[in-house]
Image (spheres, rainbow, N blue to C red):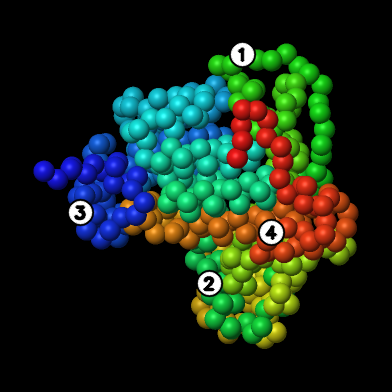
Amino acid sequence: MAKKTTRRGFLRGAAATAAGAALFPNIVRAETLGNAKRTAANSRLALGVIGLGGRGTQVMHAFMAQPDVQVRAVCDVKGDRRGQGLEAVHTAYHDDDCKPYIDFREVLGRDDIDIVLIATGDNWHSGVSICAAHAGKDIYCEKPMSVTLAESRAVSDTMTRLGRVYQCGTQRRSISHFRFAVRLAQTGKLGKLTELHAEEAGAFQVLNYDVLPEQPLPPREEFDWDMWLGPAQWRPYNAEYPTRGYWSGHVDFSGGSITEWGSHTVDICQWANSADNTGPVRFWKEGDWYMGEYENGAKLIIRTGLRFGSCPVKIVGEEGWVETGDSGEIDAYPKSLLGDRLFEGGYPPDNHVRAFLDCVYTREEPIARAEHAHRSISACHIANLVKRLGREIEWDPVTETCPHDPEANRLLSRAYREPWRL
């Protein structure tokens, strides 16, 4: 007698076939979402949310807006966030079929969880993603995908080896005006590309290495300090570390202004330059700008001062240029490149989520797959090496090393605190 295939078992397979789609008769497809009613709970993808800060909660709501998803677990090291997240889920579904957790490993250990949203601090993005892949989950992970280059390489390799669907939260790849700008570049409408301008965040410009004075440790139910630190080196508790305005500029926990927005803007520039599987070969600082040069001669320029809201980019070629950002506004030269595309409005919150869910069913590679996100954040990490070391860096995107530069190569990874490891 043939073995019965369950929905969850199917999703955990290495790939889906066209015939396999029939195993999901009650799941609403993307083309019918406009008029969809929420499907029965046992027919939905079960989601575990790991990290419930501002961005985590926002993306969780984008998932809850999809009729084929139900949040079954919420996890955060902070007790107030767990409580708020749990309340939001119970209110949305009018039931109590969701459990709170402090330790993400308990979420990953649940056989009934299909997919996870990882929206922890940057320090945990890579480690939780790798653990989730080994637990058989498909993954939507917020950006930046790593604190060091070695971490994001490990994430990409793990997803390939285990056949997991991984979507990085670089949602501008799913937004029409950014896609339009990239299409102008890739179809030759701008001529040979010469400059790719990527905005870095205005905040977190200065990286710090501080160890703050010890303060009284709160109870674990209120805040699990050891789990928050995770793979980062041990240090005494201080309430300032977990604040967004502090850890985002600390080299043990993040990459400051360059990775904060460069995760998005460098990613669009890489895509426009058809460099999704490579990167610049040389990095240096020129005034206030961090520069990279590709083998094709195009220059990556990480800077501030571009137009059109947060995370803007400008793509320049020998025959024209295009500039856009989160406001939805687009400018170009010559103007004929635009047609009637002058303003599209701000980006919608959930199309990137929908693209990920569709790939969970089809087992196709997402638009913001792990390898492409790794290559983009790699360029940010090498630019940060220029900032940290105060000098030019050569980069080999094939071997992913800095040739003849042991000092720079040592900074491509970090020592993990026991018991954590890549």
Mark before the other along the chain sequence, 3 or 2: 3
Label 2 residue SS: helix
Q: Residue at x 65, y 38 (%)?
A: 123
Look at discs 3 and 2 and give the one toward the viewer: 3
Disc number placed over residue 22 in the picture, else none:
3
Q: Quadrant of the N terminus?
A: top left
Distance from the alpha carbon under mark 3 to that under mark 1: 49 Å
Residue underneath mark 2? 180
Figure check: 285 above or below 245: below
Q: Amino acid at mark 2?
A: Phe
Residue placed furthest toward the left: 1
Label 4 residue SS: loop
Q: Is residue 140 visible?
A: yes
Q: Quadrant of the C terminus?
A: top right
Name the one closer to the observer, 345 or 319. Answer: 319
Residue underneath mark 1? 219
Q: Amino acid at mark 1?
A: Pro
Name the one closer to the observer, 107 or 188. Answer: 107
Q: Amino acid at mark 4?
A: Glu
Q: Amino acid at mark 3?
A: Ala
